[in-house]
Image (spheres, grey):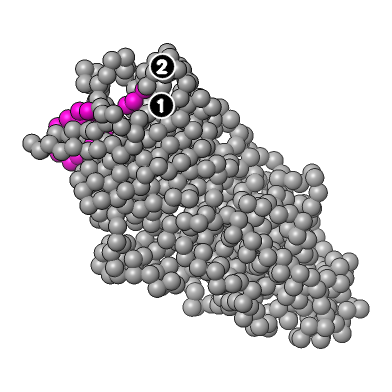
Amino acid sequence: MTHRFMTPLCLFIILAAGIISPLYADSTEINTAEVSKLLARLDLNAPGLEKVKASADNPELAATELLAYYRARISVKHPVKRTFGKKLKGKSASSTDIKRADDALKHIFIGQKSYKPYFRGDDIDWMSNPVPDKEWIWQLHRMFFWDAMSKAYLHTGDEKYAREWCIQLQDWVKKNPLDKKHKNSWRSIEAGIRGHSWTALYQRFIDSPSFTPAVLTDFLNCFYTHSTYLMQRYSKGSNWALMEAEGLAFIALTFPEFKESLKWRDEAVKRLNQEIYNQVNADGHQRELSYGYHVGCISWFMRTLELAEMNGQRDMFPKVYLKTIEKMCAATINVSFPDGSTPQFGDSKTSGPGSTYRNLKQWSKLFNRPDFLYIATKGKEGVKPESTALALKASGFYSLRSGWNRDDIGLILKCGGNGGFHCQPDNGSFELIAGGRHLMPDTGCYIYSGDRENRNWFRATRNHQTLTLNEKNSAFAPELLLWQPGENLDMLVLENASYKDLTHRRSVCFVDKRYFIIVDEAIGDGTGEIDLNFQLAPEKAVFNNEASSVRTDFAEGWNVLIQPVNQEGMTLEEVKGQVSFHYTKKEPRPAFRYRIHKTAKDQRVRYITLVAPYNGKQPEIKITPDNRASGFDLTVEADGKTRRICYPLSN
């Protein structure tokens, strides 16, 4: 039945019953001009397309034969297998998928996932943005809800999901031509994401009776537009380049019938081979220095390699390509905590306990890495990593931990180069965890677009655990001076030329795998307010103004004490503190700074601070600096014992 044969009354009754979409697009009516356009883009001499070629003068028949070809085709492999029916019923979708799919049937769509879904009208509005943040409208065009519909279709077997998806696909194609007016739907990142994800939608929907020759025609013609567009867009050096290349590769490898598919494939693979060289530092971390994007890049590099291998084209990637991916996987260990959670430097967000385990378990099999397996199984299998002190020197990540168990102490410090948009000016900053509690989390991201004031606040150097001059943002100018792990003392010394006339030198001593002594020095002619900034977890804090100390005040479990060596002219000031653990969400937290007013160019400013995580009674640890000609020593009294720590560098 097609809508062109319905009376208005019949159509109204069917719409009211919810049998078809209120868009009442006719997915069965073939546009012969569009079919002819598609046939001209295909290699009709390819094996299996004989009937399509023979019917080329009859577009309707040719489209029908083309659909029959694709439904029968088994030569192309894809990670999403075309398995429909009892085997996948009840096993393909989560409750969240079902909710999103059911909303999508009613045109209630998810854009940026941190916002609520919005109704986009009976006649779908793909263009307007219901929120000030452009991320919503951009991510609307990534169609997360379509993925949910395809999973719900396999999960339930209910044709309503496939029927509505076909209608929405044709509606989107019709309303979103590639032109300047539709720039929000045609950014290259969204085009790349669609190039990858729509091939999975094809796999799940192709056998549906709702997937008609007309739908196939619009789908393939739109993919052709995607490919020609992506061939012209290359965002070198960023994660966008990987998504662009991945989308191009997935279209080319999934639909080799296009005349230009080999050209698309070769260009996509060329870019991936180049970008893995451009974007991955020698230590394995992706150049943008944001954990979330680093893990994303592992997937974007890996998935095209896997698709190529499935289709017998593995040799397009050299051995060093996979070796570099292994190095990227290993780098995640350096920037994860003992409980398997991760820091939120840059625009990453703190992941939950154990979030790294699933990936590491998969990678342990792929790369035969028993150290990955040890971490993924919490020590039940595999081999324990050799050291608890880990460094990614090229990227500027340094990890000090007391062990590999959930309750261990872990500090991760960042001091690297400028990684671009997602990299915040926070060199020298760190996160601290103990007993699975994030005691000193990074400030986070909060938002990308639509709120510049808050975007800038969360990025600001003064709102990170580092040193500032006159509260200004610091530069990216790192230098590692010393990395010296030891059995009972790990030492790290680095500098950042934070300002034109002032360098921040930070030294971290991890003593007895229990507490940290941090020495911060302001070196140079710059004058003004030298602030040492700290932020705590969002819970009550106790300020001891006499001792200039601050501690968290959790009733149970782990706390942290920040205790500086008192000195003349130093003040303790409580300041505004916020933290964002999720996009668009923020909450208050304790924050404070130690301030010394530097009045002369040759004035030396040095902070010596104890950062001591503890469980139970607050520790009593006394630090006394002893100046000497070439630098200074620290005398530390703790637990009735005295030890000396020799500062390794000259003044």
SS at badge 2: strand
Look at mark 2 in the image and give the residue it sits on.
598
Look at mark 1 in the image and give the residue it sits on.
522
Give the residue furthest to the right.
57
Asked if marks 2 and 1 touch (Cβ < 8 Å), the reply is: yes
154 or 631: nearer the viewer: 631
Residue drawn at (77%, 56%) of the image: 232
Badge 1: residue crowd in 10 Å (few <14, some 14–19, many ≥20): many
559 or 593: nearer the viewer: 593
Give the magenta range: 605-626
Question: x, y (%) of residue 341?
Answer: 36, 51
> Which image quarter holds the C terminus?
top left
What kind of residue is marked 2?
Lys
Residue 80 in sight from this viewpoint: no
Question: x, y (%) of residue 524?
Answer: 45, 25
Q: Which mark is residue 231?
A: none
SS at badge 1: strand
